[in-house]
Image (cartoon, rainbow, N blue to C red):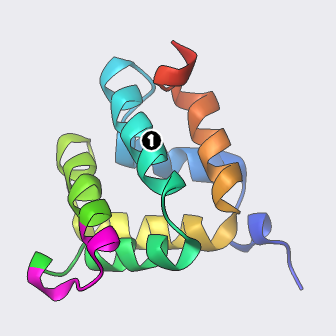
Amino acid sequence: MPDRASATGTDEQAIAGLTELFGRPGFDSSARAAVFCEMIRELTLEQALATAAALTRGTSEVGDPTVRKARHLLRGIVQSGPLKSAERAAVLLTSLFHARPMEKLVAMIEAQWNTENNW
């Protein structure tokens, strides 16, 4: 059975995908990354996957209030960042959530984007 990290590629590929979502490391992209990490810490893997899937659905179609709130935050990140595509973000995040444990994904993001915890 392959390990989760190799299931969808290397850390470099993950960072490239996250750069599409947040933007190159800098002030604005670090703010998006910080919001994302804060949001992810409050979700189970199942809720994170449901949030990614909910990006392509209307708010009224999301029954779980935790997922609805996370979807709202994530749509803001997608629309303010360079990606601007809910469909692409859903695919990217689903892949990332399946590939690595959430805490490792958060650690990778915080290290790369120097989120507010590191300012």
Counting from the top left corner in percent of width and height, residue 89 is at: 34, 63
Q: Is residue 104 left or right of residue 27?
A: right
Indicate whether residue 63 is drawn in magenta.
yes
Instruction: Give the residue displayed 64% in from the left and 29% down from the top.
Output: 111
Number of callouts in the render?
1
The answer to whether residue 46 is above or below residue 96 is below
What residue did someone put label 1 on?
Answer: 19
Counting from the top left corner in percent of width and height, residue 110 is at: 58, 33
Instruction: Give the residue displayed 40% in from the left and 79% down from the top.
Output: 50
Q: Is residue 9 left or right of residue 24?
A: right
Q: Regarding mark 1 in the picture, which secondary structure is present there?
A: helix
Counting from the top left corner in percent of width and height, residue 19 is at: 44, 41
Counting from the top left corner in percent of width and height, residue 13 is at: 61, 52
Instruction: Give the residue displayed 25% in from the left and 41% down from the top.
Output: 81
The answer to whether residue 89 is above or below residue 59 is above
Indicate whether residue 32 is drawn in magenta.
no
The answer to whether residue 8 is above or below residue 31 is below
Amino acid at the residue labelled 1: Thr
Q: Is residue 10 left or right of residue 2?
A: left
Pick out the residue farthest to the top.
119
Quadrant housing residue 6: bottom right
Q: Quadrant of the N terminus?
A: bottom right
Quadrant housing residue 96: bottom right
Q: Residues in magenta?
A: 60-68
Q: From the viewer's side, name the closer residue of 48 and 111.
A: 48
